Structure formats: structure tokens, C-alpha cells
Amino acid sequence: MYTDFALVYDRLMQDVDYQGWADHYVALLQLAGIKDGATVTECACGTGNLTLPLSTHYHMTGLDLSQEMLSQAALKLKQAGRQVPLVCQDMQLLKVHKPQDVILCTCDGINYLTGFKGLSRFLGAAFLALKPGGALAFDVSSLYKLSQMLGDKTLTSTKGDSHYIWYNCWQPQASLLHMQLHVYTRAPDLRFDYFVEEQRQRAYKPDDLMAALRCAGFVQIQVFGGRTFQVPRDKDERLHVLAIKPKEKETA
């Protein structure tokens, strides 16, 4: 996943308000008492679109399964004069050099864990990677977004010299969205290069996420709708989740 796609990802996602997204994470972490200067490992960091603005607040480490996406992130961070360690690692097998104040999983990273076993592995690894009292925060595309807004629809878009046709297939019983992206990019000789990117995402309900977090040992679990600090609504497209690793002798 993301081998050829990494080269055009930022062009296709150029309308996303990453600064606003990062600002919301800062506000979310403030609820957990996380201050500037904290140590933060960001899982599923992709090309670093959130890593870069978050690095103005925290000592960041970026982690992703795709070396190609990390290469794009490294270039972006270097151009901005930011020194952020980047690690190619499966977040389900998350290991850190020393316990962190925060573990993040951004940009739908949880949705790409398409089964509860994978979700449980990641949450368990994140729990072990945190300091006592540390925070886990992540976002997911909601069931409404994956099933209704994307569902069985075909989408098209043109971003400069990049064009895509995006075919979706929703499996309601498995809560899985199969995505097939046909991407065309104009080469310097004016011909078009073409590749196909296939992905799968799972929709998780808030109650399922909370149950999995409790099972992993987390406490003070909160789920918010969109970029708010309100209870999720039926048509919220994104959920943000915050959970805390208990301090010593603290229980759920």
C-alpha cells in the first residue's frame, strides 16, 4: 500500500486543513494535561502533514509502515528545518526507545486495522509504550462517512496534473469499505503515468472503541464528534478519541 501513491498523495490531499487538524490535537491533548515539550510518537504519520505542525509543540517521532511515505515526510521536514526521527514500523508491533508522554494514531490509521485482533494488538502496544499517566489519542472516519458518504459510490477528482477515479464497495456485515483508486499523473513528456491503489478501511463504533480501550487497560476514555468536544452525532464524519494510561496504583 502507498508505494506509487506516496508520490501523489499530497497533491490529492491539498485541500485538507492539516493545520486546523493539528491544532485540534493540541487542544485535545491539553485535556489530558499534555503540555508543549512532551514526547509524542505519531503512528501512521504518512507524509508528515500533521507531524510538521505538531513538531512546533512537541518532541515528535513519526512512524509509518510505508517507507515511501516516510521518504516524502523526511523531505518535507527537512525543507521546514525540523529534525524529527522517522521510523518504518508496523504500529501493531509498536516499540519505542523510551516511554512516551503521548501516542498518536492520525489520519484514519485505526480504520486500516480491519479486525479487532489488529486493533487490540495496537492498543496493547500503545499502552506499553506510554508513561504512567500518558495519553493515547487517535481519529477515525466514522461509520456514517464510510458507509453513507463513500459507500458504493464512485468519485472522481482532478488536482493539477493528477487525476483519480475512486471506486468504493461497502460490506455492511463486516463494516468494511474496499477502495480502488485509479490514479493518472502527467509525466514531464506530457504522457500520463497510471497505477492502481487498493485499500480497505473498517468502521468502528464508539462503543466498540471504548470497550477495546478498557480491555487494553486505559481509563478516562472520551470520544468526541468531529473537531469538537461534544458527544458524537449520527452524521459526524470523524471521531476523535482520548484515553489515559493509569498512573501507578490507579484503577479503572
Image (cartoon, grey):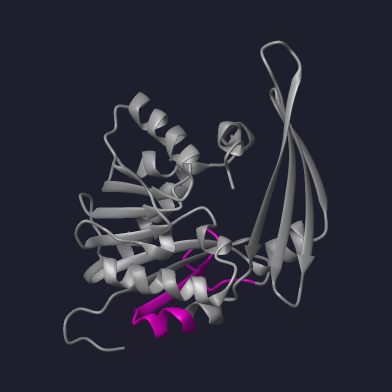
Residue 58 in view: no
Decide: is 179 above or below 185: below
Left or right: 78, with 239 as reference point: left
Q: Nearer the viewer, residue 123 or 51?
A: 123
Decide: is 83 above or below 151: above
Among the 4 quarters of the image, the one containing residue 113: bottom right
Left or right: 59, with 221 as reference point: left
**Residue under the point 76% across and 17% down:** 191
Residue 98 in view: yes
* Residue 98 horizontal/vertical position (percent): 19, 59
Among the 4 quarters of the image, the one containing residue 179: bottom right
Quadrant location of the C terminus? bottom left
**Residue under the point 55% across and 80% down:** 208
Q: Nearer the viewer, residue 38 or 26?
A: 38
Among the 4 quarters of the image, the one containing residue 79: top left
As for residue 229 lying within the magenta part, the answer is yes
* Residue 183 horizontal/vertical position (percent): 73, 35
**Residue under the point 39% across and 53% down:** 89
Decide: is 218 above or below 72: below
Q: How many marks?
A: 0
* Residue 164 horizontal/vertical position (percent): 75, 37
Name the residue at the left extreme. Answer: 248
Name the residue at the top extreme. Answer: 189
Where does the magenta region start and end? 211-233
As for residue 39 lying within the magenta part, the answer is no
**Residue under the point 29% across and 27% down:** 81
* Residue 70 horizontal/vertical position (percent): 43, 39
